[in-house]
Structures are given as structure tokens and as C-alpha cells.
Image (cartoon, grey):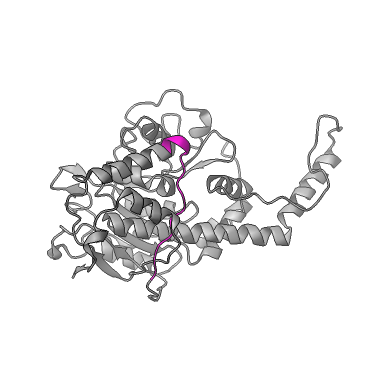
Amino acid sequence: MLRQSRRSDHSRTKSPQGLREANSTDSTDNDNRGKYTYPRRREGFWNNPMNAVAIFAGSFAFAASLTMGVMNARADGAATSVWSRMLLGRPHMPEDTGNQLLGPGSLLLNSKSSQETVPLLIMGLPRSGSESIHNYFTCNKIKSSHYCCDTEKSLAGQPARSQFPCRKDQVTCGSCVLKNMKSERPPFQGCGDYYVWSQFDVETTEPYSWFLPQHKTLPLIHEAYPNAAFILNTRKDAGTWADSVLHWNSVTQRLFKSFNLEVLESSDETDPTTTPSKKVTYRSLMKDAQESLDRANEVENLKKKRKLLMTVYDRHMKKIRKWAEDYGHPLMEINVDDPQTGNDLAEAFKMSQGCWKFDADALDNDWKNFTFPF
């Protein structure tokens, strides 16, 4: 049974001032997980010119720097379960739909009012099990993309860096989304015929930079797909996610750059580089490699980086929950580490439980088995 949440009328729309406040004010998370919740219909959102101004402001901010401030949210102190879910928005869905969220004839895949596909967007941060979610839907015969996309036509001028490790006839989904947003087109236009978008972030050509639309461009996603449904995939806690990130220096550096975090320098005063004035020998290379390992293992810096990454993780979780609630996007939250997740997905989506597979050890220790695919 779907429950109608009770919310004040002033929460149905947001003025530009309210949007700015939501991005700048510290508050806690409205954790209503573990049950289905549908906020009341927000009548006249697009009829209010001030809301159009808010969307324009978000678009302008993106065009200027592709960044938005970190948004925090409220919490009512509710207990957090290991696996939890909440569905927010879509108040027009009839109660007799039950838990039929996806699949043939599902309202999330086929909007009867617009006759257009309603996308299901995976909104977790990188290294949060998005590939397992992609494999789950693919196994259940639902068209899903993960990092690589079959575009309607080749995107001319895409650098090779944006295509690796995709096939020659593919591009990264994130590069397609980024190009569309820069051209003021719907994010997924021409990026492939998919129902589920499992990973649509991408490394950009700027060194150590990362385009993360699931965090940075929520106003543009909402403007193009106001009925899109979200899955927020989480790890069992922020520390687990941070540790997984820290295993990869390139991933750590890109996240620090993307979220404007200070990249902490080592207190080691020795020169770790091999400059042209130095003679390059095997011994010097091994010495440089050891110094790099020493810096990586420097305990205090590692603790500080881990703490900063945990803050990024927690703020992203709160931001997605808050956005979904305020703007009426159905949101389902899952913990990929929970062994019961397969059962919960099967119940929610009416699909095969056996299609869910997640190996936490393989994800968190993939750095030990890294090889180049050529």
C-alpha cells in the first residue's frame, strides 16, 4: 500500500532563493526509508516563472563551471536499516500498482501521459556497485547502459581518452551526456536506446577531473526528465566506500578535484620525481616508486583523505534524498553490500532474484589484479 506523505503547501515548489538555501544550508537528512512515500502533487511547477528562473540559474552555473555546491538535507532521527528503500514522488500513480516498479508495462518505463520512456537513473557515486545493478537489469532483459553507450551516431571529435575502454564504435555515456548539456540538449539524447542509465559520469580531458552529473547537474536532469526515477546505490558505510576509493590514486585525485577538496601534500621533503637533469636508472626508478609508496602509506595524510572522502559520500547521499523528495522523483535506496539485496530487488521490481550478484571483495580489491586490456 502506498502512503501519501503530509507536507506543507510551501514545499511543493522552490523559488530561486529556496534553491540557493537548499544548496548552502547545513541540515540533516529526512530519512524516511524502509517504506514507500509519495509527496503530494506539486501543481503548477512549470507555470511559475520563478521556477523557470531557478532552472535557468542552475543551467548557467553548470555552463560556467560544471559545479554546484554540496547540498545537505534534514534528518528526523529515524533508524537506518542495512538495506533500505524509499520512493518519493509520482503521486499520480494509482495505489493498485503495488510494487510493480519496472518491467513490461511498468509506469516507470512507460509514461502513459507523455508516451515517452521514463528513465531509471543510478545516482550513487563511483565505486558503489553500479555495474552489479547494470548486470541485474541486463540479466532481466531490460536495456541498460554502464559507462559505454551505443550512440545513434558517432560523436565526432571525441578524444580517445573518452572512449577507453569502450569499443571503437562506442563512446562513454558520460562524454555523450556532457556534450549534450554543453549544447543545451536533453542529457541522454542520442546516447542510446536504454531504460536504465547505470553509470553516466566520465573523466574529462582536464587532468584529474571528473564530470559527475548525478551530483553536479541535478537541475538540468530534472528539467529534461521531471518524471525520472532514481536508484541510490550505497555501500554499507562511508568508510567502506572511502577505503575502496583510496586504493586507486587516480580515482582519489579526480574526486578531490571534482569536489574542490584540498589535495594533501606529503610531509616528506625528498624530491619524488625524476627530472631531466637526473640520470634515469633502474635504481632511481625503484627509489621513486618506493617514495611514492611511502607517501601513500603516510598515516596522518591517509586519515585526513579518508575523512574528507567520507564527508563527500555522506553529503551526496543526503543531497539525492533531499532532491528526490523536493522535486518528486521516485527514489529507491539499496545497500549493495547487504546479502538480502537480491531478494529486495526481486520484490520491488518483480524480476528474477538470481540475476543479482555483487562481490564486495572483488570490487574493493580490484587494484590487486589490475592489468591493461591490451
Q: Is residue 69 rendered magenta in the image?
A: yes
Depth check: give the residue in front, 348 or 327.
Answer: 327
Depth check: give the residue in front, 127 or 304.
Answer: 304
User: Would you place residue 233 above or below residue 219 in this image?
Assistant: below
Quadrant for the N terminus in the image = bottom left
The span shown in magenta is 62-75
Occupied quadrant, residue 56: top left
**Residue 361 seen in the figure:** no
Q: Is residue 317 left or right of residue 115?
A: right
Q: Is residue 174 left or right of residue 367?
A: left
Quadrant for the C terminus in the image = top right
Depth check: give the residue in front, 205 or 354.
Answer: 205
Q: Residue at left 77%, top 46%?
A: 289
Q: Is residue 200 rendered magenta in the image?
A: no
- Residue 180 drawn at (x, y percent): 36, 33
Count how many numbered circles sit on residues in the image. 0
The kind of secondary structure the magenta stretch mainly shows is loop
Q: Residue at left 72%, top 57%?
A: 297
Depth check: give the residue in front, 214 or 132.
Answer: 214
Q: Is residue 289 left or right of residue 80?
A: right
Occupied quadrant, residue 321: bottom left
Q: Residue at left 26%, top 60%?
A: 11
- Residue 77 drawn at (x, y percent): 40, 75
Q: Residue furthest front?
A: 17
- Residue 104 drawn at (x, y percent): 19, 52
User: Would you place residue 35 above or below residue 246 in this image?
Assistant: below
- Residue 361 drawn at (x, y percent): 54, 61
**Residue 218 seen in the figure:** yes
